[in-house]
Amino acid sequence: MQDIFRHLEERQGQALETLIRLCRQPSLSATGEGLAATADLVASLLQEAGFQTSLLPTQGGPPVVYGELAGRSPYTLLLYNHYDVQPPEPLALWTAPPFEPTLREDCLFARGAADNKGNIAARLATVRAFREVRGELPISVKFLIEGEEEVGSPHLAAFLRQRRELLRADACLWEGSGVDWDGRPVIILGVKGIVYVELEARGAARDSHSSWATVVPNPAWRLVWALATLKGQDERVAIPGFYDEVEPPHAADLAAADLIPAQEEEQKRSLGLKGFLLDLAGPPLQRRHLFEPTCTICGLASGYAGEGVKTVLPAAARAKLEFRLVPRQRPEDILEKLRHHLARRGFGDISVKPLDMGELPAHTSLEEPIIGVVAEAAREVYGAEPVIYPTMAATGPMHPFVHELGIPTASTGVEHPDSRPHAPDENIRLRDFLLGAKHLAAIIGRLSPRRP
Amino acid sequence: MQDIFRHLEERQGQALETLIRLCRQPSLSATGEGLAATADLVASLLQEAGFQTSLLPTQGGPPVVYGELAGRSPYTLLLYNHYDVQPPEPLALWTAPPFEPTLREDCLFARGAADNKGNIAARLATVRAFREVRGELPISVKFLIEGEEEVGSPHLAAFLRQRRELLRADACLWEGSGVDWDGRPVIILGVKGIVYVELEARGAARDSHSSWATVVPNPAWRLVWALATLKGQDERVAIPGFYDEVEPPHAADLAAADLIPAQEEEQKRSLGLKGFLLDLAGPPLQRRHLFEPTCTICGLASGYAGEGVKTVLPAAARAKLEFRLVPRQRPEDILEKLRHHLARRGFGDISVKPLDMGELPAHTSLEEPIIGVVAEAAREVYGAEPVIYPTMAATGPMHPFVHELGIPTASTGVEHPDSRPHAPDENIRLRDFLLGAKHLAAIIGRLSPRRP
C-alpha cells in the first residue's frame, strides 16, 4: 500500500485544488442556490477520475450524482456523500467569506470544507491514486452523492427503493467522521432520526403600534407560551408519549459508548462552553449525548430584532423546532404527538409545518466483518486505536441503506473536532484530509482479492 | 379666521412640498441614520417661516431644534414635535419605498408622514399663513422639535430642566392626534409611561451543530422559559408587585373614556383582526386599552430564521420587551421588579439591558382653560363634536412638560385611524393635513388679544 500512500502525499496539491473548486461553489439546499451547478461540477470531477457518471433525477429534489467504476474484483463498495451545504449565516462571524476557501496554518476554511466536500475530494484522490499507480481499482466502487442531506434528504429513501439494483453493493462507507481530539480515528455505526418543523403564531394582519398590546393578541406571547409547554427546565421533553417508543440502548452499545475516551475539556473549549447541560460529565454525559432524543429550538423570529428600540406589536412569530430521534421513535408519530399536545393545551391556533419529512434512526452491528476491516485499516493509517461509536448524536439518511438496501454501513471522514460543521469558520486540517484518503486506500487494499 | 383658512387652502401645495422634503429625509433614532441632516433641514424650514432658530445640544443625543417667533401678545404656545421616525422594517410590506413619499388617492404614504412630520409641516403652514396674510402672529409661538422620541426621548427631561426659562409658555400643544373613524377631532390629555429592555440569554460561544443539544445549553429555551414566567395566558403580568403602584383611574377619567364613541369594527378592519384580546368589546375594551399597563414582546431573535431548515444550536437568544405604564408606576421600579423576579425564578443568567431610560405617565386635567379652547376650535374647524381622551394607550415624553414645566398640554394632529404609524404603509390624508393646520389657526385665533 506504500505506493498508493506516497502517491497521495505527492499529489496532495491536486486533491486540495479539487476541494477548493468544490468549496468555491455555493450549494445551499435550504434555498436551492447553486445546486445544479454543483451537481455538474461533481459529475465532471468523477468523470475526470474515471467514473461513468449520470445525474439521476429524484422526485422533486436536486439530482443525485451517481458514478461507478468497475475494478478487478466484483466486490463493491458504495460511497455515500452529499454535495449540498448548510447556509453560511451568521456571515459576520466568519474570519474570511464562507465561499472563498482560505488556507490558514494547516487548515482550509470554507463552508462545506468539513461537511462534506472534503470527504468527496479525499475519496476521489484515493480512486485517482489507484488508477494512476496501478492502472485499475482492485475492487469496484460506486459513488452516490446527493444534494439535499442538509435539509433531511427528503427524496433519498424513495430514490434508493427505485434504484435498488443499480446500488447493489457489499458495504457502504458513510461520510461525517474523522479524528478525535487526540488524533484517534473515529468510526460511527449509527445515526439518530430527525423531524424538523416550523411553528407559527399569527396575530393582526400587519405589525402594529405596540400601544395596541392592551387589546390586540400578540403572537410572540402565544408562541412563547406554547414552546414553554414542550420542554421543562429539567430538560425532559414534556410532550405526552414522546418517550413511549424509545428502545433502551443494548448492553453492547452502552459498553462501546463507555469505552469512548472522554474529551470533555477539548469539547468545551471548542464549543466555547463553561459546563455541559445539567452539569453532566463522564459516561452519563456520553450516554446522554448518544442515546437521548432531543427537542431543540433552532431559531426564533418575531417583530423587530435590529439595533435599538422599535415599539411594535408583531403580526407573526415563528420558531424552528427540531427533534432528534433514537431507535424505535418515528418522525410521523412524534409530529402527531406534537400536534395533539398543542391542540390539547389550547394552542390549536399555532400552525405546525414540517420542513423536513423526517429520517429514521439507523444502526449497523459491531459484528459485521466490514467493521473489522475499516477498524484495522484505521489502526494502520492513523497509528492509533480507532474509537468506535455505536451510534452518533447527529443524523444522516443512513436508514434506507442499512434497512432497505441491507448494506452494513460505517462512517469515516476527514473532520477534526474543531471543524465547526454548520457554524462559522467551518474548516478541515490538511493532515486529516490526507489521512482520510489513505484510510480509504487501506480499506480498499484489505478488500482486494489476492493476486493468483 | 376665514382669511387664514382660505390662505391655507390655496397654499396647500406648498405645505405638501415641505412635508415631502421632510419625509424624503430618513431620520432613524434607532440607528442614528440621517438625524443630523434632518435637524438642519427642520431648522431651515423654521427659519423660512420666520422663526429664530437654534440647534440646542442634548447630553449625548441628537440636538433639539428650537425656534421662537414673538407675536402681538406675550401669550405663548409651546409646540412639541419630533423629527425622528421609526425604522421602516419590514420593507417588503411597503407598497412604495418608505422614504420615497408617494401620493395615492387622497393619501401621502411615507415613513414619518403621520408620526409626525405631517404635524410639523401643518403647524409651519399655519404660522406662515398668519405672517403672509396678517403680517404677524397674534400670539407668540415656540417650537421644540426633538430627535429621539421614537427611542423614548432619553435626554429630553434633563434638557427641559436645563432650559426651563427658555421654554416658559402658557400652554403646550402636543403631536400624535388627529381624527377618528367618523372624522371627529380627537384631543388627548395624557400618555402612558414606558420602559423598554432587551433580554439576552447566552449559551456556547458560537452557534453549533444542533446534535449537541443533548448536552449543550440552548439559550433559546432559557429565554422562552423566562419569558413564559412574565405573563400568563390570562394576559395578567405575573411579575410580583407589577400592579402594586397602579392608581385606579379617577371617576371623571372613566366617565370621559366611556363617552368615547366605539369604533371597534373600524379598528378591527384597520388592524386586520378578527377579534380583540379576551373577546373584549364596548367600555371594558376602551377602559383596558386606556388604563391598563402592558408587558409586550416586541421582538424575538435566535439562531436561524431564514427559509427552510438549518440544524443549528443557537449561541444566543434575544427578546425586546416593552412595558407601558399607567399613573404611579415608575420605570425604575418596574425594571427592578423584573430583575428581581428573573433572579428569584432562577434566570439570573439572562441579562436585562434597558434600551430606553423610561418615561413616566402624564396627565392634564379636563378643567384647564386651554382644553376648552382646543375643543371649541376643533368643533369649529371639523364641524363635529371633539372626542376627548383623558389619556391614551401610547406614550410620549409629556411628563416633564406637564409635571416639570407645569404647562397644561393637549395633543392634536393630522393622523387618521388607518395612518399606521410604526408600521408599513404609514400615511396621512391630505384633508386631515389641511384640517390640522386650520385647527391650530383657530386655536391661535381664540388665544389672540382682542384689538383695542
Image: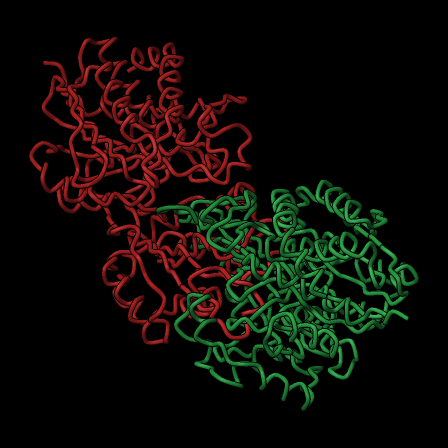
Chain colours: A red, B green
Quick one: quadrant of the C terminus of chain A? Answer: top left
Is A423 above or below relative to B235? Answer: above
Is B173 above or below relative to A148? Answer: below
Image-based side of B448 in relation to B360, left or right: right
Which residue sits furthest bottom? Answer: B251
Quick one: quadrant of the N terminus of chain A? Answer: top left
Q: Is residue A364 visible?
A: no
* Residue A157 vs residue B110, the one in the foreground: B110
Q: Residue at x 37, y 25 (%)?
A: A25
Instruction: Give the percent coordinates (x, y) of residue A203.
Output: 43, 66
Image-based side of A290 in relation to B368, left or right: left
* Residue B305 vs residue B31, the one in the foreground: B31
Give residue A127's quadrant in the image: top left
Instruction: Give the percent coordinates (x, y) of residue B273.
Output: 42, 69
Image-based side of B389 in relation to A18, left or right: right
Which residue sits furthest left? Answer: A165
Is B367 above or below relative to A255? Answer: below
Q: Residue at x 42, y 40 (%)?
A: A422
Instruction: Give the percent coordinates (x, y) of residue B210.
Output: 42, 49
Q: Is residue A281 visible?
A: yes
Instruction: Give the percent coordinates (x, y) of residue B274.
Output: 39, 72
* Residue B389 vs residue B439, the one in the foreground: B439
State how many labels appear: 0
Give residue A118's quadrant in the image: top left
Which residue sits furthest right? Answer: B165
* Residue A108 vs residue B298, the one in the foreground: B298
Give residue A339's quadrant in the image: bottom left
